[in-house]
Image (cartoon, rainbow, N blue to C red):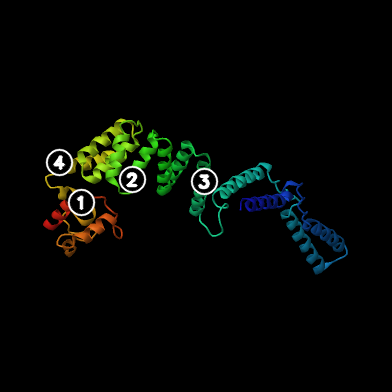
């Protein structure tokens, strides 16, 4: 596909050359206006004719001569200016612009299968790179190559292959802190919260990277251990974590839940009120006050944890859900 794109680009450049080539040559002179010469010739002929005429015929010829002289005063012999030659710098600028656009098109559209989108093309490119890194890691068997494979999979969002890669690194290099940290993060993302806490709480003692603390705080938050979540996030910020605004918001939420007298009310205010109304009266989401679905807690839990329609899923542990249900039934 890249070769085809280059061929098309070359053909386009050649087409531009032949289109603009005539404009680079000498300008052709503009044809001379023949009308003045025709009028002068007629005027000379009428003067000779008028010498032999008398009466009305002579008057007619004299009127015609006067008209011609007046017409000659309005028609000039000035030639129209020759067209300007096409500036070479314009052609050069067009060529440079074309080369730039072609490079972008080749990079993001041409190297893909017929009918595929740019996103699909990038996915294929990532898959090819991942395959290449995997082959290299399997061939060398080194922890460094497996780590490169795992990191690329992690950054690409291929969490299963990332977990596979980090597991290999841990087996080859049991002291590799990054592999343990990323493996703990993957456990947290996959819902294995307790296992994630076990690994990350040990990793952050020896790891200077704040990434592990961010996900350790998330894991504690999921279990309802809000004070430990706050501690982890506070340490994350102290070590220079970049997700400052997000973490400060989470810390405030955790603090409100940790000190709440009515945990269900706090959770509702934080996660539900914006769409379902401050008193459960409904808004962009349906009314919850007195809603019959509250008699089916498992159905509510399914909706809360997995989302439905425009409602996003909400991470919530069993303790939080029970408190929320108790509050909803009081509305």
**Disc 2 to disc 1: CB gap under 8 Å:** no
Q: CA distance from mark 4 to mark 1?
A: 18 Å
Q: Label 3, on which residue?
A: 129
Q: Secondary structure at mark 4?
A: loop
Q: Label 2, on which residue?
A: 187
Of the two numbered discs 4 and 3 in the rendering, the one whose residue sits closer to the viewer: 3
**Mark number, residue 318:** 1
Instruction: Estimate how packed mark 2 is, as few (under 14), some (14 to 19) or many (20 or more) residues with alpha carbons within 10 Å.
Output: many
Q: Is residue 94 visible?
A: yes
Q: Secondary structure at mark 3?
A: helix
Q: Residue at x 14, y 44 (%)?
A: 260
Sequence-wise, the earlier of marks 2 and 3 is: 3
Sequence-wise, the earlier of marks 4 and 1 is: 4
Q: CA distance from mark 4 to mark 3?
A: 49 Å
x%, y% of residue 202? Answer: 30, 35
**Mark number, residue 259:** 4
Sequence-wise, the earlier of marks 2 and 1 is: 2
x%, y% of residue 133? Answer: 51, 43
Instruction: Estimate how packed mark 1 is, as few (under 14), some (14 to 19) or many (20 or more) residues with alpha carbons within 10 Å.
Output: few
Q: CA distance from mark 2 to mark 3?
A: 25 Å
Sequence-wise, the earlier of marks 1 and 3 is: 3
Judging depth in this view, the residue of 37 and 244 nearest the camera is 244
**Disc 4 to disc 3: CB gap under 8 Å:** no
Sequence-wise, the earlier of marks 4 and 3 is: 3
x%, y% of residue 61? Answer: 80, 64
Q: Is residue 246 visible?
A: no
């Amino acid at each position: 596909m890249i070769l085809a794109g280059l061929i098309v680009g070359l053909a386009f450049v050649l087409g531009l050359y032949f289109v603009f080539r005539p404009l680079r040559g000498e300008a052709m002179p503009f044809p001379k206006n023949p009308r003045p010469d025709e009028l002068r010739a007629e005027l000379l002929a009428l003067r000779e004719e008028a010498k032999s005429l008398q009466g009305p015929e002579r008057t007619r010829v004299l009127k015609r001569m006067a008209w011609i002289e007046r017409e000659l005063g309005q028609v000039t012999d000035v030639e129209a200016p020759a067209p300007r030659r096409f500036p070479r710098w314009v052609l050069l600028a067009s060529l440079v612009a074309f080369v730039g656009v072609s490079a972008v098109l080749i990079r993001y559209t041409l190297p893909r299968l017929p009918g595929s989108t740019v996103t699909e093309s990038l996915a294929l490119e990532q898959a090819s790179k991942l395959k290449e890194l995997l082959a290299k890691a399997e061939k060398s068997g080194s922890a460094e190559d497996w780590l490169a494979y795992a990191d690329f999979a992690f950054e690409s969002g291929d969490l299963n292959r990332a977990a596979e890669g980090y597991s290999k690194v841990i087996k080859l290099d049991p002291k590799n802190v990054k592999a343990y940290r990323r493996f703990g993060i993957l456990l947290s993302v996959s819902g294995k919260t307790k296992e994630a806490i076990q690994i990350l709480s040990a990793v952050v003692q020896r790891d200077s990277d704040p990434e592990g603390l961010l996900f350790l705080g998330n894991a504690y938050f999921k279990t309802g251990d809000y004070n430990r979540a706050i501690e982890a996030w506070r340490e994350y910020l102290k070590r220079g974590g970049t997700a400052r605004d997000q973490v400060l918001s989470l810390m405030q939420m955790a603090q409100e839940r940790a000190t709440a007298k009515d945990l269900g009310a706090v959770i509702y205010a934080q996660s539900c009120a914006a769409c379902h109304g401050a008193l459960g009266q409904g808004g962009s989401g349906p009314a919850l006050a007195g809603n019959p679905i509250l008699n089916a807690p498992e159905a509510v839990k399914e909706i809360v944890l997995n989302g439905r329609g425009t409602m996003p899923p909400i991470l919530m542990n069993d303790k939080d859900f029970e408190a929320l249900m108790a509050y909803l039934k009081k509305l």
